[in-house]
Image (tube, rainbow, N blue to C red):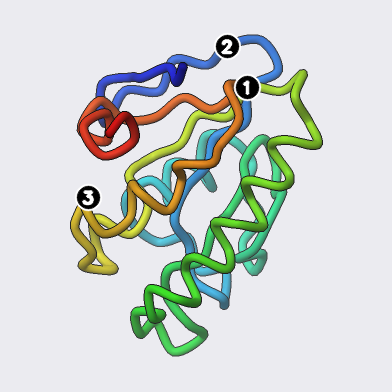
């Protein structure tokens, strides 16, 4: 069973990693990415994987154009594998891709269906994850 949180509210748990949508250039200039950079040590220039107390999942390319859903899924699958390999760590997943990248919740949330129980999602995704 998944855990859920209110969107826009980060309540860190012990050994918690903040998961946010990024771009391949690692420019963390807005939204959750900006929060990750300024508050949790996400390194400017790192757009994929662990960075600071965060995990970056790209939803935009190096030219800040939205990646295709297939490419986003590839990066989500890599994250899911990482989370499963690090079961002692809690992952706080934001609504990646549902802001500046322009995807809807019903397009992105189902990509996370095979996530492990150490993942915590925005309440808005519950209807898509528990079908």
Task: Give the residue furthest to the top.
Answer: 14
Q: Is residue 93 above or below residue 77?
A: above
Residue 65 as seen in the image, left or right of residue 115: left
Nearer mark to the viewer, of 2 and 1:
1
Residues at circles 2 and 1 in contact by the CB criterion of under 8 Å: yes
Q: Nearer the viewer, residue 61 or 131?
A: 131
Closer to the chain start, of discs 3 and 1, is 1
Q: To which residue does mark 2 refer? A: 13
Image-quadrant location for residue 47? bottom right
Residue 85 rendering spot, x and y as whole percentages: 80, 36
Residue 54 rendering spot, x and y as whole percentages: 62, 41
Closer to the chain start, of discs 2 and 1, is 2
Give the number of marks: 3
Q: Secondary structure at mark 1?
A: strand
Q: Secondary structure at mark 3?
A: helix
Q: Is residue 119 above or below residue 63?
A: above
Residue 87 rendering spot, x and y as whole percentages: 75, 24
Q: How dense is the environment of label 3, judged by Cα within 10 Å: few (below 14), some, or many (20 and up)?
A: some
Q: CA distance from mark 2 to mark 1?
A: 7 Å
Q: Residue at x 62, y 46 (%)?
A: 80
Q: How dense is the environment of label 1, judged by Cα within 10 Å: few (below 14), some, or many (20 and up)?
A: many
Q: Residue at x 32, y 50 (%)?
A: 31
Q: CA distance from mark 2 to mark 3?
A: 24 Å
Residues at circles 2 and 3 in contact by the CB criterion of under 8 Å: no
Q: Which mark is residue 78?
A: none
Q: Residue at x 78, y 31 (%)?
A: 86
Nearer mark to the viewer, of 3 and 1:
3
Residue 11 rendering spot, x and y as whole percentages: 44, 15
Q: How dense is the environment of label 2, judged by Cα within 10 Å: few (below 14), some, or many (20 and up)?
A: few
Q: To which residue does mark 1 refer? A: 90
Q: Which mark is residue 105?
A: 3
Q: Secondary structure at mark 2?
A: loop
């Amino acid at each position: 069973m998944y855990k859920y949180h209110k969107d826009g509210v980060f309540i860190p748990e012990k050994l918690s990693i903040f998961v946010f949508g990024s771009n391949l250039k690692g420019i963390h200039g807005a939204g959750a990415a900006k929060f990750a950079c300024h508050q949790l040590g996400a390194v400017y220039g790192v757009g994929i994987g662990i960075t600071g107390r965060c995990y970056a999942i790209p939803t935009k390319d190096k030219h800040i154009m939205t990646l295709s859903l297939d490419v986003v899924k590839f990066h989500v699958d890599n994250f899911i594998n990482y989370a499963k390999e690090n079961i002692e760590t809690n992952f706080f997943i934001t609504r990646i891709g549902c802001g500046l990248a322009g995807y809807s919740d019903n397009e992105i949330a189902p990509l996370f269906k095979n996530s492990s129980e150490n993942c915590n999602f925005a309440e808005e995704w519950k209807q898509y994850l528990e079908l």
